[in-house]
Image: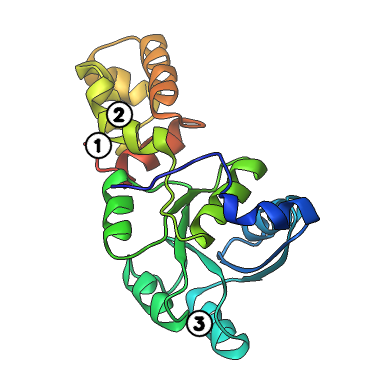
Amino acid sequence: MHNLHSETPPRVYSQAVQAGKLTMRVLIADDHDLVREAIASLLEQEGIENVETVSDLNQAIARVNDSGAFDLVLLDYKMPGMNGLDGLAKMKVANGGKPVALLSGNMSRAAVQDAIDQGAAGFVPKTMSSMSLSNAVKFMIAGETFAPYNFMQDADSAVGNLSTRETEVLRGLCDGLSNKEIARDLDLQEATIKLHVKTLCRKLEARNRTHAAMIARDQNLL
């Protein structure tokens, strides 16, 4: 992978930035109302005024057909109609060759690499700060390929950082077992399992045990 950036905005927009507003059209497609409106609000706060939102792939394609190509389209990787990277391919055609990127809360490095290999302008985690998000948008509109450096470096090593016991506990989480059930299966104290779960959440950057299991499934860690 090449041309991956994370923070500094491209020089091509320096004059627009100095003027206070960026004259670009961005379309956000996400089936979670709060998520897409929050992202739109963050971009607007950073001076990107012309941001539109829709809730699925079909609406996104219809919006492009009605109002013309956008400078950047951000697609939620798992929203209705996407079918993996099929939705990316459809939107690239609809948007006339202008950049199309993927949004996701949990997307594996392999999936991101596949998307970029198939022409995605990049991958934007939904947890990015407003400044980083706006910089990512500027990079992709400028023709660069964006993916957070730390994400691309760290994702492959996540499972390698887990001990054998942590991997066993993670498998229990993925099977929907409670701490007590995992403790019984592994012949350990429940308090020990709780400590392992806490460590797993830290290593996988998960919010809780359910999120850890989701990350493990999405990234095929087991």
In the orientation shown, which residue stands out farthest toward the bottom?
Answer: 66
**Camera-nearest residue between 48 and 108:** 48
The answer for how far apart the CA atoms under marks 2 and 3 are is: 36 Å
Whichever of callouts 3 and 1 sits on the residue coming sooner in the sequence is 3
For discs 2 and 3, the disc positioned in front in the rendered view: 3
Q: Secondary structure at mark 1?
A: loop
Circles 2, 1 touching at the beta carbon (< 8 Å): yes
The amino acid sitting under disc 2 is: Ala
For discs 2 and 1, the disc positioned in front in the rendered view: 2
Q: Is residue 60 above or below residue 133?
A: below
Badge 1 is on which residue?
221
Badge 2 is on which residue?
158
**Camera-nearest residue between 90 and 209:** 90
Circles 3, 1 touching at the beta carbon (< 8 Å): no
Residue 208 placement (x, y as % from top left): 49, 31
In the orientation shown, which residue stands out farthest toward the right?
Answer: 20
Residue 5 placement (x, y as % from top left): 45, 43
Instruction: Give the residue at x 32% y 57%.
Output: 116
Circles 2, 3 touching at the beta carbon (< 8 Å): no
The amino acid sitting under disc 1 is: Leu
Badge 3 is on which residue?
61
Mark 3 neighbour class, 10 Å CA radius: few under 14, some 14 to 19, many 20 or more: many
The answer for how far apart the CA atoms under marks 2 and 1 are is: 8 Å
- In the image, taking residue 199 as reference, residue 136 lies left or right, namely right
Q: Is residue 185 above or below residue 214?
A: above
> Which quadrant of the view contains residue 201?
top left
Instruction: Give the residue at x 34% y 38%.
Output: 152
Res. 44 visible in picture: yes
Q: Is residue 137 above or below residue 70?
A: above
- Rendered image coloring scheme: rainbow
Mark 1 neighbour class, 10 Å CA radius: few under 14, some 14 to 19, many 20 or more: some
